Image (cartoon, rainbow, N blue to C red):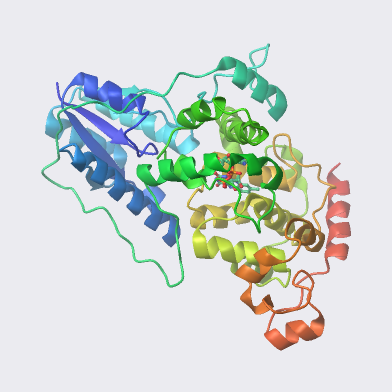
Amino acid sequence: TPTVMWFRRDLRLADNPALLEAAADGPVLPLFVLDPALWGPAGPSRRAYLGASLRSLDASLRQRGSQLSVVRGDPVRRVALAARAVGARRVHVSADFGPYGRRRDAEVEETLAEHGVELVRTGSPYAVSPGRVTSGSGEPYKVYTPFSRAWADHGWRAPVEPPRGGSWLTLDEDTIEIPEPALPDGLELPAAGETAAHRRWREFLDDVERYGDERDRPDLDTTSRMSPHLRWGEIHPRTMLADLSRLRSAGAATYRKELAWREFFADVLHARPESAREYLRPDYARMRYDEPGAQLDAWRRGHTGFPVIDAGMRQLRATGWMHNRVRMIVASFLVKDLHVEWQHGARHFMRWLVDGDLASNQQNWQWAAGSGADAAPYFRVFNPTTQGRKFDADGRYVRRWVPELADVADPHDPSVDDRDLVGYPLPIVDHAAERLEALARWEEIR
Ligand code: FAD
């Protein structure tokens, strides 16, 4: 019988168990629903990346004599209409564990059931689905290290091949072209799609040894940049874990731990869905914060007068990505130097990051704000100037993203004269004073 494969954040053919299940059912309609609720808040980089990823999936399907049918609208209605159009009895998906996705899928499931159609969930974007790993007492883990041990012990299935042959269906009505939004000037995005993901992964594996020691250096391009590919499911982490398990290198072991962080944060969000918006540690909601205003705006635009902050914020706008160490520094700065609640920063990140993922983003923001799972102790306040000097010692990262500073003597702390000469702003706050202010506010809630 005809069936539907509804792609969401699993934009690939290889190692896609839901697609295999669909192919085993009968002729498959590959479907993507452009959901205004998700498309609306996305910024230009995110939209462009998704468009490119969908075109790549469509191209792979076309090589198999199929194509991706794309419709726009509320998935609750759209998926039911598509199922009816091809006479499907089942709709296959890979499970979504985010708060919005879970709610949406429950509604889709209910509507489909009214028409006698079943929603079948197979697999998820994780090696171990959120909620599977629990402590001895059956509770979700609140701390990373025991989680990562239990996660590794739990284990995962081996990667599966893409479907062989198969017969395919398309929608005749109501479909739209895959969107191809124009990129604003100067925006340069990573290559999207399954082929690009595997190419990048193979390149990175050749260099994985360096990752262990150099991953904290934004001036060296040593991290994998796999995050957008993972976010959109162009490759499954299981595939990557299988490759890593064949390597005996310290770099590979470190990398595996980072993938475990991704799974940990998904697990935390699953256990505490309200933490997408609210403080995971409720006492932090009592802290005094400042109303966001001109300083938040300067942060967003990369005009704070703190070179490493401005470099990171400009890298984000120019490429849809920012180095992890710099994400930590800019997040700490927003919360602890500008006293702005983390949610404002998280929203800006989600708008611009091509890897923007609710679980990783919100939980990392909570981590930086001191309110998260296994969070950085609040009293440890990053000094943006010394962080810059430590991780970008000769200033290459700063010079690249803040070109005004290309020729100044001390790119991490330019003199007042140098700033004046090249048109770079003075620091918008006094870090030492704001650090004390942050600690005083923290004392109030302890
Ligand atoms: P690598 O260093 O090569 O790491 C490999 C993979 O491990 C990453 O692709 C990612 O999937 C995972 N990973 C690494 N570090 C983390 C981490 N701290 N938390 C979760 N997963 C991790 N990551 C996102 O994927 N989406 C986000 O929206 C996001 N928002 C963030 C916001 C803040 C404030 C901070 C501090 C971090 C955020 N991260 C987010 C985590 C991390 O910065 C990125 O995953 C990483 O920079 C991506 O680059 P990479 O693939 O080269 O990383």
Quick one: 318 or 443, which is closer to the camera?
Answer: 318
Quick one: 164 or 375, which is closer to the camera?
Answer: 164
Q: Residue, x 78% and y 54% (percent of image)?
A: 288
**Left or right: where does residue 197 sit relative to residue 59?**
right
Number of marks in the rendered image = 0
Name the quarter showing ligand 1.
top right
**Left or right: where does residue 184 sit relative to residue 22?**
right
Residue 231 seen: no
Residue furthest out toward the bottom: 421
Quadrant (top left/top right/bottom left/bottom right) for the N terminus? top left
Residue 264 seen: yes
Quick one: 287 or 386, which is closer to the camera?
Answer: 386
Q: Residue, x 76% and y 46% (percent of image)?
A: 286
Residue furthest out toward the left: 172
**Left or right: where does residue 408 sit relative to residue 319?**
right
Whole-percent x and y of residue 265? 60, 34
Whole-percent x and y of residue 54? 31, 47
The answer to which image quadrant residue 283 occupies is top right
Quadrant (top left/top right/bottom left/bottom right) for the C terminus? top right
Whole-percent x and y of residue 281? 72, 37
The answer to which image quadrant residue 47 occupies is bottom left
**Left or right: where does residue 215 sit relative to residue 64?**
right
Q: Residue, x 67% and y 16% (percent of image)?
A: 135
Up-down relation of residue 242 to residue 296 (above or below):
above
Quick one: 14 or 92, which is closer to the camera?
Answer: 14
The answer to which image quadrant residue 301 occupies is bottom right
Q: Residue, x 63% and y 61% (percent of image)?
A: 312
Whole-percent x and y of residue 128? 52, 23
